[in-house]
Image: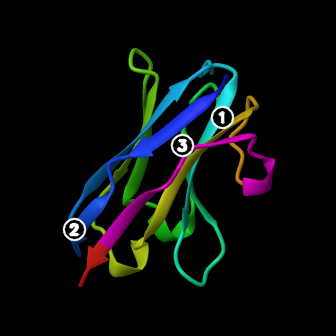
Amino acid sequence: DVQLQAFGGGLVQAGGSLRLSCATSGITFDEYAIGWFRQSPGKGREGVAFRSSDEVSGRYADPVKGRFTISTDYAKSTVFLQMNFLKPEDTAIYYCAAVKSPFAVRGDNLYQHWGQGTQVTVSS
């Protein structure tokens, strides 16, 4: 059974940092791509960071490039999203998701497994 659990959200001031964690079970990182998505009120779900199964490099949506970094702790079966220089527009519920694919996958409709969200609020 594949399970994902996202946590680590919170309230932070603009310019600050947070690290989100996505604890996984039932997947192997060399077979699954992982993505981080977010959704704010009144907006659709937006992909922010993507990791391919071989993790050659992360891929990022333009609004977060240079500020967010996706990484993996294989021993802990956990994928992280380090978020620096946070802005009020980063406020959203953040989700992690997994799909069996060797490539980084941007489309949220292609993901097979989702964790529950974690709230990130950035105050100005």
Residue 29 image point, x, y percent: 59, 22
**Horizontally, is 98 left or right of 67 in the view?**
right
Residue 116 is one of the magenta-drawn residues: yes
Q: What residue lies at 66% left-to-right and 34% top-to-bottom?
A: 33
Q: CA distance from mark 3 to mark 1?
A: 10 Å
Asked whether the beta carbons under mark 2 and mark 1 sit within 8 Å of each other, the answer is no
Mark 3, residue position = 58
Q: CA distance from mark 3 to mark 2?
A: 24 Å
> In the image, is residue 78 above or below residue 81?
above
How crowded pointer 2 is (Cα within 10 Å; few <14, some 14-19, many 20+) is rated as some
Q: Secondary structure at mark 2?
A: strand
Foreground disc of the pair 3, 1: 1
Asked whether the beta carbons under mark 3 and mark 2 sit within 8 Å of each other, the answer is no
Q: Is residue 107 visible?
A: no
Q: Residue 12 has which mark? A: 2
At label 2, the amino acid type is: Val
Residue 107 image point, x, y percent: 75, 55
- Nearer to me, 54 or 117: 117
> In the image, is residue 17 above or below residue 15?
above
Q: What residue lies at 61% left-to-right and 80% top-to-bottom?
A: 43
**Horizontally, is 104 left or right of 15 in the view?**
right
Q: Which residues are magenta?
A: 108-121
Residue 95 image point, x, y percent: 53, 53
First reached walking from the N terminus: tag 2 or tag 1: 2
Q: Secondary structure at mark 1?
A: strand
Foreground disc of the pair 2, 1: 2
- Nearer to me, 67 or 107: 107
Q: Secondary structure at mark 3?
A: strand
First reached walking from the N terminus: tag 3 or tag 2: 2
Which of the 4 quarters of the picture holds residue 90?
bottom left
Mark 1, residue position = 33
Farthest-out residue, right: 110
